[in-house]
Amino acid sequence: MTDTHIPAQQPETSGNKLGTIWSAFRRDPAANIVIILVLVQAACIIGGLLYPDDFRYLSGLNMKTLLRAIPQIGFIAVGVAILMIAGEFDLSVGATFTLAGLTMAAFYAAGVPVVFCVMAALAIGVAIGLVNGFLTLTFAIPSFIVTLGTMMILRGVILYASGTATMPFRPEPWFDSLLTGQIGFLQAQFLWFLGFVIAAWLLLSWHRIGNHVLSVGGNRGAANAIGVNVFKTKMFAFGAAGFMAAMSGIVSTTRVNSVSPIQGQGLELQAIAACVIGGIALTGGRGSALGVFAGATLIYTVQNVLLLIGAPGYYLDAFIGLVLVAAVIANGVMNRRG
């Protein structure tokens, strides 16, 4: 009788656990941009420590400014990311941002309680998103064209309603503190942004709606074949994009205590850039909330560094353009390998 030797199962060591975590992280669409963001932050911190007088990256005022700026594009990028993963685009989010802030300020000036002003602004954002979705899906028109038209219409409405003038918004102190106050060394709007990033991560990773969004964006025909309601899923994504654009407008208007009819111009392109840089696939069906956070943070970190070293503003546009093209190429390579 021959003894059969069964090798003992090797216990999982901390090294194996770290390797498993690293492998899982590298499979995330946002892995590369997160690594780049970490390296950029490390370089900025080292520079701030070595040259504290010439490069004030670590100063309290600069950190406060940075944490206030990131959420403006971050809020919009969260909604745009969900929509892009569903396979659609929204070029009207910049105009929605402005119209939501204008609506809130106008209602408040008319004596409406601030809570109802916020509700009205959010309703405007969701309504614009749903109209975009309805026109896109009902008439089979590319969302790029529909939302381009919506953007131009909304800009005309904004200029007419505002009279091309800046409208003030000075709410009660409690409301100002709730959205834009300081909590410890962090800014309230940055914590709100983190909250929405976590909510988007939970939605896309663990909720049935998130699975539907990924399925519809990856393969619409296959999603429809397994019973996913494509129309409702994409309408949800359009509504989410409008809601987040309105949320950004509300927070930004509260932060600066006013709303300008031109302040949202260009935000739609920056939001798309943040998403693509963060690993959101242009073809849909692929992306993560972590990438949105990393993309938005990287854009404003670079902008902040350029301001600190006194570089011309157009350097930022050049950087975003270069990184955007590189991200598209990298995403294409990764999709072909997948």
Image (cartoon, rainbow, N blue to C red):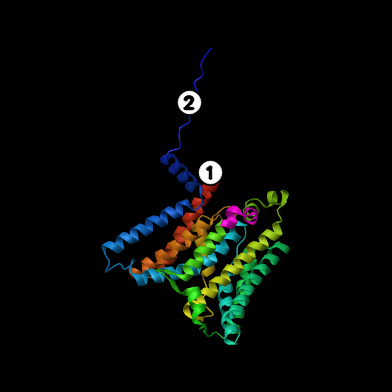
Taking the image as drawn, is residue 269 in sight? no
The residue that mark 2 highlights is 7
The part of the image, by quadrant, that contains residue 98 is bottom right
The foreground one among 60 and 163 is 60
The foreground one among 287 and 327 is 287
The residue that mark 1 highlights is 337
- The label nearer to you, 2 versus 1, is 2
Q: Residue at x 64, y 66 (%)?
A: 239
Vertical comparison of 114 with 82: above or below: below
**Rendered location of residue 143, percent (x, y):** 64, 63
Q: Check disc 2 and give the amino acid type.
A: Pro
Q: Is residue 12 magenta?
A: no
Taking the image as drawn, is residue 68 in sight? yes
Q: Residue at x 62, y 51 (%)?
A: 218
Which portion, as a residue range, is magenta?
Answer: 202-212
Q: Earlier in the sequence, mark 2 or mark 1?
A: 2
At mark 2, the secondary structure is: loop
Cα separation between marks 2 and 1 = 36 Å
Vertical comparison of 99 with 7: above or below: below
Q: Residues within 10 Å of mark 1 (few under 14, many from 20)?
A: few
231 to the left or right of 43: right
